[in-house]
Amino acid sequence: MTADSFPGSGTGPAGGVQAPAPPAPEPARTTPAGPVLGFRELSERVIASVAERCPWLHRVLMGMLAVFTGTCVVAVVSRLSPLPLIPVPLFVVAAYGLRQARGMTERRQLFNWVLLFALATIVGFWLIAVVGRWVE
């Protein structure tokens, strides 16, 4: 350390190490910024873009719901218990939401139907886990 690094020492006006000058302010923009988007608007955009880019996704998801439902039906036969049928109504609701979402052109309605599909599927899987614990 040198004597110039202490405040009040040295020949500079404030002495010591000087901070760099602040950056110059940016010029004001002439175009107004776009609207601030929230989580829902962002989700609507993402879902709409996926629906436009992947038209085959509807069939794949419907097929997966059919496999999930079929697995529950097979589990009834293999476990000799009706408990694995509990999530089937939720998978039917999910399929209904997915079917309704296919024809939607408005982003808000598309988001609502996809949200119904996702929540019904998630709760159905949760019920499968709960039923699995009951049957053990």
Image (spheres, rainbow, N blue to C red):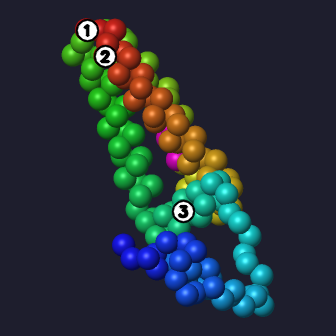
Q: Between disc 3 and disc 1, whose residue precedes?
A: 3
User: Of circles 3 and 2, which is in front?
Assistant: 3
Percent position of residue 48, x then y: 57, 63
Q: Between disc 3 and disc 2, whose residue precedes?
A: 3
Q: Is residue 60 above or below residue 46?
A: above
In the image: residue 3, left or right of residue 73? right
Percent position of residue 60, x then y: 37, 53
The image quarter containing residue 19 is bottom right
What's the CA distance linking mark 1 and mark 2? Answer: 6 Å
**Looking at the rendering, in which quadrant would you find the N terminus?**
bottom left
Q: How many marks?
A: 3
Is any atom of residue 119 visible in this view? yes
The residue indicated by pointer 1 is 136
Check disc 3 and give the amino acid type: Val
Q: Specify few, some or many for label 2: CA neighbours under 10 Å numbering under 14, 14-19, or 20 or more.
A: few
The residue indicated by pointer 2 is 132
The secondary structure type at the circle numbered 3 is helix
- Segment tinted magenta in the rendering: 94-98
Residue 46, labelled with which disc? 3
Residue at left offset 39%, top offset 40%: 65
Is any atom of residue 85 visible in this view? no
The secondary structure type at the circle numbered 2 is helix
Q: Specify few, some or many for label 3: CA neighbours under 10 Å numbering under 14, 14-19, or 20 or more.
A: some
Q: Nearer the viewer, residue 24 or 3?
A: 3
Q: Nearer the viewer, residue 50 or 5?
A: 5
